[in-house]
Image (spheres, coloured by chain):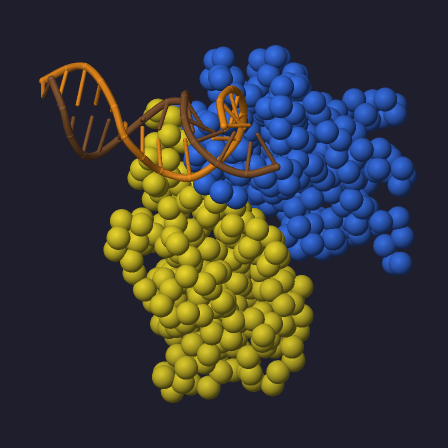
Chain colours: A blue, B yellow, C brown, D orange
Amino acid sequence: MANAAARSLQAGRTYTVGMITTDSIGRFSIPLLIGAEDALGAGQVSVFLCDARDDPIREQYYLRTLLGRQVDGIIVTGRRTQARPPIGPSLPVPVVYAFISSTDPADCSVVPDEADGARRAIEHLLAIGRRRVAHVTGPEHHHSATVRAAAAMSTLAAAGLEPAAPVLFGEWSEAWGRQAAGILLSTEAPIDAVFCGSDQIARGLAEALQEAGRRVPADVALIGFDNWDVMVDGCRPALTSIDMDLEGIGRTAAELLLAAINGDPAHGRRALPGRLIPRASTAVHPAL
Amino acid sequence: MANAAARSLQAGRTYTVGMITTDSIGRFSIPLLIGAEDALGAGQVSVFLCDARDDPIREQYYLRTLLGRQVDGIIVTGRRTQARPPIGPSLPVPVVYAFISSTDPADCSVVPDEADGARRAIEHLLAIGRRRVAHVTGPEHHHSATVRAAAAMSTLAAAGLEPAAPVLFGEWSEAWGRQAAGILLSTEAPIDAVFCGSDQIARGLAEALQEAGRRVPADVALIGFDNWDVMVDGCRPALTSIDMDLEGIGRTAAELLLAAINGDPAHGRRALPGRLIPRASTAVHPAL
DNA sequence: ATGAAAGCGCTAACAT
DNA sequence: ATGTTAGCGCTTTCAT
């Protein structure tokens, strides 16, 4: 490519987009980034990466930097799925929110369909014959936790079932999973499956259940959420999990941004379905 | 900031650097990225992120893209510490290698001092009174594995000790850690400490040792490498580990790049020391 | 068909 | 001290 500055100057566009992660760059941002980069790189568009570290000041600083650099568009991501206020009012370039969504319905957001993911998890447990299903998840004030819990409960209800225990809200950690196992083991009625709000919780639960003599999946089947490789593979038995297709979300967001840049803006929230990745923790015939 | 394209055009510099990760963006690249972004952002320099996915074609494509965009400099990173050939011959802008290093000694590289990290690990084990120390690590063809193993062995030798078992080379996984535990347990002489080449290996080892009835750290003290939060915290007991200060490496690389851009280039490899982060897996009085 | 020139927005050097 | 202008490298338009 010849001198890009001169081209940009006269063309009025830079073939550049900004990507602002409002929380820090982390486990969730990486696949988003890779997906976005994939779609953009193919279109010869380069990505400015900005890490706002959950700091509104940094966020606005980067926003101004990006606009000053005349980016053609901006992707906003974060590590929580909760809707957030628009990053700025009436910006001169298109903005697409990925993973997080904007509270303004006119904005374009691409998010994982967490409710659908939870539904798939429960239906999988029902399909392998489990009827006494519990749900252990993250903090009650966390959007992902409440959305997944509500969908899990309503899927159970649709099958005519009560949850085997009230939803256990806690933290997104293995420690909480272990602690929750203790709580579930002390309940009267036996439980034959647990859907966990994260792979970490599921792994902690798996360890503690087995230390207490329960077999996984024979006695208790287990499903996690996120399909985080080190967790699902490190867990024994390997953990069935819901994959939110973050890379697909990143790619879709980038494609919608490119479309918007080319004059065809999209609006509203689109929720992408996830996939259930079956592994040993819900195998029907664990011996095989 | 006013129109950046016009400024760049006439100034001949863009206040932009490129960051090429030759392997994919992953767990190691993120802290590097954050550190680099930190140092650069403070200097009003924006970062183009390029993920070459271990593909030489993509690497060259991105290199040309970055040069076409007249970046002021380039940071090259990867997920292996092994030295690699320079990304291009006689480039018109300064290049700094971060985490990986260049085989050309005239190039500027910032890498973790892995040998120093291994030495700290062994010395810590010796300091808490262990004398029968084994080392379990990744693949023998992996640079990090051999460097750490050699440093561990020579530190033991310097203390007049033989390793309690030959170095066990395997994979960077929990599964290998569990397997290695079996091997170590079947050796004649008892082992009172294991230095592991990664936190994942250490975690697998911790699990398997304890399932076999050994107490950690009372019977066997354990040290990992990487200080990866989910592993060191998820491990029971919490894992002592070596932190390579990746963020510091990223920051240093960025600072050296800025200096080079300002006409003061550095050359050669500089190795940054890591830190030992003590946790329960090497506690002298576990009860406390 | 090929070539010359204007202008994108800014800065720095110059003239007033 | 303030104002004017040339030119960075490219594309697009217009004249040859």
Q: Position of residue B220 (x, y in %)?
A: 52, 70
Front in this rendered view, residue B99 or A220: B99
Residue plotted at (43% across, 76% down): B151
Residue plotted at (62% across, 13% down): A105
Front in this rendered view, residue B10 or B70: B10
Q: Position of residue B26 (x, y in %)?
A: 56, 50
Q: Is residue D9 left or right of residue B79?
A: left
Placement of B239 over or under A8, stated as above or below: below
Placement of B128 over or under A196, stated as above or below: below
Total numbered labels placed on residues in the image: 0
Q: Position of residue B111 (x, y in %)?
A: 40, 62
Residue plotted at (44% across, 29% down): A9
Placement of A232 over or under A98, stated as above or below: below
Q: Quadrant of residue C6?
A: top left
Front in this rendered view, residue B55 or A232: B55
Locate the N terminus of chain B and report the quarter of the image it occupies.
Answer: top left
Locate the C terminus of chain B and report the quarter of the image it occupies.
Answer: bottom left
Q: Is residue B124 visible?
A: no
Q: Position of residue A67 (x, y in %)?
A: 43, 25
Placement of B256 over or under A194, stated as above or below: below
Q: Quadrant of residue A185?
A: top right
